[in-house]
Image (spheres, rainbow, N blue to C red):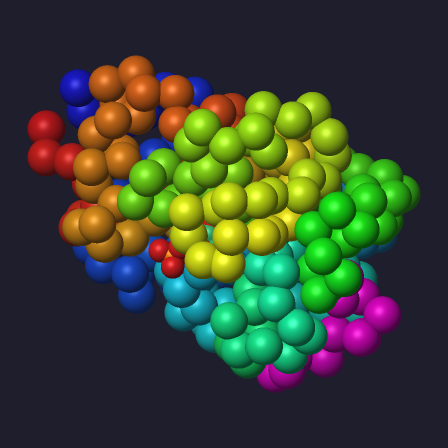
Amino acid sequence: MSIAELPNAQAVIVHDDLDDLSAAVALRIAELAAQAIAARGAFHVALAGGETPRRCYQKLRELAIDWNHVHVYFGDERCLPNGDAQRNDSMVRESLLDHVAIPTTNIHNIPAELGAREAAAMYASLLGNIAPLDLVLLGMGEDGHTASLFPDNPATESAAAVVPVFDAPKPPAERVSLGLNSLNAARQKIFLVAGAGKRAALERILHGDYLPAARIAVAEWHLDRAATPER
Ligand code: 6PG
């Protein structure tokens, strides 16, 4: 099977390398932001954590985006103290938000320092006021997880808008994640997947493994060549 047959995908775009992937997704974000702001006066985007999106966020700094009308949320957060370098919001601040003129009131961190249950409940009420999100950016782990929805973890099966996650195999074990329904309800979903380490999970999805990343419907997948199974 060719990667173009990725189940549930709206589009699959293979880029030569992470730099090209990052530039292309940055342009897509700017385009979707302009469309949402023109249509509804605001762009509500949930950003992905991990390392893959870092370069895309750095490239976003250079694009013409009306940050006054952009609201940033997070697809998931690690239950670590505020300001911990390993938090997803720390990476997003360093690579993007500290470099653009976005009002601080437009940045909606997940209060994961409060613990997964309390943070999930608080974030669900915040999201409830704006759902659906205009865009959700997503990464994928080597086990096929996305956001903090891991294979064989009860949080992945929850219907809740925002879910507490325990026993995550990727440290820290305690996290908060948008639930599958919230991720799927977004107007647009974009995956950024790069590196040979992700190829096996993509192969499994191609062959019908219903991994969490495969359960995001109608998503736009941006892959680099290293992550793309040869077919
Ligand atoms: C996290 C992310 C997680 C990430 C994937 C891919 O907390 O780590 O939310 O879902 O997107 O694990 O991570 P990399 O981009 O670092 O490979």
Farthest bottom residue in view: 99
x and y percentages locating residue 76 in the rendered image: 60, 51
Question: Could you say which is closer to the camera, residue 77 or residue 135?
Answer: 77
Q: Any magenta on residue 101?
A: yes
Relative to residue 126, is residue 55 depicted above or below?
Answer: below
Residue 10 is at least partly visible in this image: no
Q: Quadrant of the N terminus?
A: top left
Residue 93 lies in quadrant: bottom right
**What is the magenta range?**
97-108
Relative vertical location of residue 98 with respect to residue 138 in this rendering, above or below: below
Q: In the image shown, does 18 or 62 lie closer to the viewer?
A: 18
Query: Residue shown at 80%/66% (left/top)?
Result: 106
Q: Position of residue 48 (x, y in %)?
A: 53, 55
74 to 93, vertically: above or below = above
Whole-percent x, y for residue 75 in the image: 61, 49
Name the residue at 75% across, 47% down: 117
